Image (cartoon, rainbow, N blue to C red):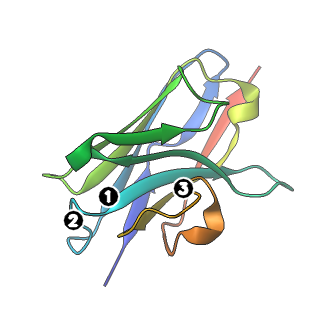
Amino acid sequence: QVQLVESGGGSVQAGGSLRLSCAASSVIDSRFYMAWFRQAPGKAREGVAVVRARDGFAVYADSVKGRFTVSQDNAKDTAYLQMNSLKPEDTGMYYCAAARWLPSQPLDAYEWGLWGQGTQVTVSS
C-alpha cells in the first residue's frame, strides 16, 4: 500500500523556521519524484517544490526561492522541506506528493496522483 505521511508542521512567528518531513512507504523508491504543495483556506493548492535526489533535480515556486530547501533521503524513504524566513503568507496545509514520472507541469497539483494527509503550518506576524 502506497502511503505518504507528513510531519513537522506547527506555529511559528514570522522569520522563523520549520522542517517538514514526508515519510514514504517502501514502494516509493529513488526513481520517484517527491513534491510539496500547500493550500491556504479558500485558495487553490499550489506547488512549492519538487525533488528527485538521484539526479539532483529540484524546482521551486518563485515565492519560496532562496527561503525553502527541498531534499530527499532515499535511504530513509523520506523527503524534507526546510523552510526559513517564514512569512505569514506561507501559512497553510502542506501536502507531500509522489510520482514515478515527472509531470509536464511539476508545480501543478492536478498532475500528481499520490498524496499525504497534510501537516498544518501557521506563521504569525
What residue is pinned by disc 1? 23
At x 58%, y 17%, the residue is 85
Between the residue at mark 2 and the residue at mark 3, the CA separation in whole angstroms equals 18 Å
Residue, far bottom: 1
Looking at the rendered structure, which numbered label has been put on residue 70?
none
Q: Amino acid at mark 2?
A: Asp
Vertical comparison of 120 with 113: above or below: above
Residue 89, x across and y down, in percent: 76, 32
Residue 68, x across and y down, in percent: 50, 28
Residue, far right: 42
Residues under numbered marks 3 and 1 in contact, where contact means CB atoms less than 8 Å apart: no
Residues under numbered marks 2 and 3 in contact, where contact means CB atoms less than 8 Å apart: no
Residue 25 located left or right of residue 49: left
Disc nearest the viewer among 3 and 1? 3
Mark sitting earlier along the chain (2/3): 2
Between the residue at mark 3 and the residue at mark 1, the CA separation in whole angstroms equals 20 Å
Q: Amino acid at mark 3?
A: Pro
At x 76%, y 49%, the residue is 40
What residue is pinned by disc 2? 29
What residue is pinned by disc 3? 106
Crowding near pointer 2: few (<14 within 10 Å), some, many (20+)? some
Query: Of residues 115 and 41, which is closer to you in this image?
Result: 115
Image quarter (top left, top right, bottom left or bottom right) of the N terminus: bottom left
